[in-house]
Every structure is written in structure tokens, then in C-alpha cells.
Amino acid sequence: MTPRTTAALMITAAVLVNVAFTGLATVFDYPDVLKHPAADVLASFRATRAAVTGWFLALALGAAMLAPIAVGVGRLSSSRPMRWAVPVGIAAAAVQVVGLLRWPLLVPGWAATAAGDDPAAAAAAREAFGTANRVLGTMIGETGGYVLTAAWTVLVLAALGTAFAGRWFVVLGGGSAFLVLVGVLSPLDLPVIDAANFVGYVLWSGWLVAFAVVLLRHVPRTSASRLDERHAHPGR
């Protein structure tokens, strides 16, 4: 994978995730809708199923792009932090995709059953939906995604440092990673936590796009050995 391809994936992923998230917030009141009772969430899903399913698929696609991005970025350095960063980035993509795909794959069935005439089946569907939100959503998709995305970012920064693009690259990346990681405290249900996490992802998206621009403008043919040489001789 060339640096240009990696940069294109970075920009596409950042734009796609933010557009999809905005779409879900508009038609489904996501993620605030998850604070409502399961019956209300499933009813809202049924009313907007096509749009919600499409936006969640787009969001999952954007999250999945972190895997090839991690592989492409991994070619910028052969340092130990970067060797760790590649599998961590792939794992970050995987857990987020697992968490998000419950909506197009599992929720439609539960939503239909919850609206049926069998009270026992409807109750079971609501319970299954709640369990999936806790396990696939909160534990795997969100908490796993926050931790692994922040870890990938920090490892990349440790590998590339200020020699890659300057101090701003490290400050913006590190600051956004910290705010993303704050999301693990979301179960405390404190408004400031969700706000910080949201700002973190916005900043992280900006960092990813800026990373791509630097890659396109300054290192279109960078090999691992050349970038490592810059770290060894930063004054060059």
C-alpha cells in the first residue's frame, strides 16, 4: 500500500464517519436514543429502519477503514512502537465494526418481534436488545474502540514523533487520543464525559485528515528506512 493510498483512506474514513454520525443523529437521535427504554428505541428503529440501517453500514465501513490505514501507516517506520501499532489499529477497527453491525444484522429482527402480538417474545426481544447494547455496544464497540483507537494513536505518535510533521502533530494527536479515551467513563453518565469524548473524536478526525495531507505533500514515496533515518538525523 502506497502512502497516497493510505492518505486517501484516512480522508475517506474521517469524512464518512462524521457524515454517517451526523445522519444518525438527525434521523435517529443517536447516540442519545440509547438512553431511552428498549421498547422506545426499537419503535424508533422500525420507523426509520432503512435510513438508520444505511447510516450504520456507512459508519461501520468508515470504522473498518482503520485496519488498512494501520497497515499503511505501519510502513512509515520499522520502530518497535509502530510494530505494535499495526495490530492495535486492526483490533480497533474490528471491535468497532462488531459493535456497529449489530444494528443492521440483529436489531431488525428484535424490532419486528418486539412489535408482535406475543408478549413473551416481545419481552425476550427487548431483553436481547438490551444485552447486545451492553456487550456488543458498550463493552466491545465503545470501550474497546476508545481504548484501542487511543492506543493506536499514541503508538503512531511515539514512532513518528515531531520529526514527521512538527510539534502540532503530536499535540493534536495526543490531545484527541486522551479525549477519546475519556469515553471509557461514559457509564458514569456524566454529561461532561460524553461531550469530551465527542470533541475528542472531532479532533481525532481532524488529526487524521491533517496526517493525510502531510503524507501527500511531504512524503509521497516514504519508505520505512527513510523515515527512520530522519528520526536518527532530525537535523537533516
Image: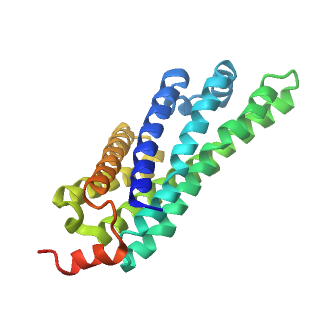
**Relative to 233, 125 lies left or right:** right
x then y, percent, for residue 109: 78, 33
Colouring mode (rainbow / by chain / secondary structure / one colour)? rainbow
Could you tell me how many numbered marks the image carries? 0
The answer to whether one can see residue 37 in this image is no
**Relative to 24, 107 lies left or right:** right
The residue most toward the left is 235
Quarter of the image where one finds residue 40: top right
Q: Quadrant of the C terminus?
A: bottom left
x then y, percent, for residue 106: 73, 39
Q: Observer-nearest residue: 135 or 14? A: 14
**Relative to 32, 235 lies left or right:** left
Residue at horizontal 67 percent and vertical 18 percent from the top: 47
The answer to whether one can see residue 42 in this image is yes
214 versus 189 height, above or below:
below
Q: Observer-nearest residue: 86 or 32? A: 86
Q: Observer-nearest residue: 65 or 20? A: 65
The residue most toward the right is 118
Quarter of the image where one finds residue 74: bottom left
x then y, percent, for residue 149: 44, 57
x then y, percent, for residue 131: 68, 45
Residue at horizontal 33 percent and vertical 40 percent from the top: 192
Residue at horizontal 61 percent and vertical 24 percent from the top: 51
Residue at horizontal 29 percent and vertical 61 percent from the top: 219
The residue most toward the front is 221
**Relative to 118, 91 lies left or right:** left
